Amino acid sequence: MRILVTGGLGYIGSHTCVELINNGFEVIVIDNLSNSSIEVLDKIKSITNKNIIFYEGDITDKNFIKAIFSMHQIDAVIHFAGLKSVLESIAKPIEYFNSNVLGSINLIEVMNEFKCKKIIFSSSATVYGNPISLPINENFQLGYSNPYGQTKLVIEDFLRSIYKKDATWGIAILRYFNPVGAHKSMLIGESPKGKPNNLMPLICEVALNDREFIDVFGSDYDTKDGTGVRDYIHVVDLSLGHLKALEYIRNKPELITVNLGTGEGYSVLEMIQTFEKVSGKKIPFRYCNRREGDVAISYSDTRRAESLLNWKSKYNLHDMCLDTWNWIKNK
């Protein structure tokens, strides 16, 4: 089975490519390298001992996508490509709608034209907005508190409309919580270009003495220690969730929507403290005002993933921090 992975050299995409190849799938990757590196291609090859086909380009270029589908018989698409910073989306909403929404529409239109009707879409827990209760399950009312979340919800709605019109599609909408960690090989991990926005890369910069301290946004949330609480999930667990979703839709036309998280909530301070324990490094921090668009607490109800996909996370916060530290100090 030949799988097209958009954004396949990015953080989650690269780990998913490894799991796909190790499970016998043929992988074609497209990536515009805006937040990834071409060196990741060789690292995937080193881990899997397999070559993969790679094309550099952007999904906002419809002719580029058509050319790839013209050259290859593609059986399914795993769609990661897009911009992903909550904070940046507030400052650059036009760029986010262009990349995430227009790019996704281009991709799905070409898929339809070439009768490739199986797609796994990389969505986000941000589509739940500010949840009214916890844990968050897939039937919660949807909303958004920032343009990034809005783009994800727009694409979800578009996919639901596609399926309503044509039920021969197999569609898996996967709502991620907060991916962290790195591959056990220490060859691939989270390595954002430019100024990082996520917590773990910032912690790593402090541990490597590239940054003096971390800004902790909010100390007065209604949480155990006043800092924001998130459901952190190991990127390898997340990647394996994509394989389970692919297995589910490859044999049946259906639309499923599934949370991928651990079902556990950890605060910013708990993340910092756990990283300090595994690394032996002190991670200084300072409190700042809350960020626009952030919610206090977010963690998942994992029952649908367990029952529908037979998937459950196996790595804990200690594993996530240790694998990240091993990766970052060996880069």
Image (cartoon, helix red, strand yellow):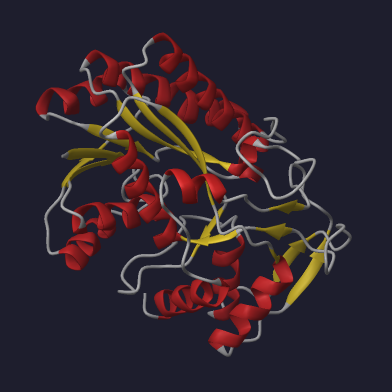
Viewer-closest of 134 and 223? 134
Give the residue drawn at x 22%, y 18%: 115
> In the rendered view, does 75 fall on the left or right side of 247?
left
Give the residue drawn at x 59%, y 79%: 275
Most extreme residue toward the top, as rendered? 165
Viewer-closest of 94 and 122? 122
> The N terminus is located in which quarter?
top left
Residue 31 visible to an observer of this rendering: no
Give the residue drawn at x 24%, y 23%: 116
Residue 244, position in %: x, y? 35, 48
Image quarter for residue 191?
Answer: bottom left
Viewer-closest of 47 and 56? 47
Residue 126 visible to an observer of this rendering: yes
Residue 282, position in %: x, y? 65, 86
Number of numbered discs: 0
Residue 173, position in %: x, y? 46, 35
Image quarter for residue 119?
Answer: top left
> In the rendered view, does 277 fall on the left or right side of 187?
right
Image quarter for residue 317?
Answer: bottom right
Residue 61, position in %: x, y? 32, 23
Most extreme residue toward the bottom, as rendered? 280
> In the rendered view, does 216 fall on the left or right side of 120?
right
Where 84 falls versus 329 (above or below)?
above
> The C terminus is located in which quarter?
bottom left
Most extreme residue toward the front, as rendered? 307
Give the residue drawn at x 28%, y 23%: 117
Where 94 falls versus 3 (above or below)?
above
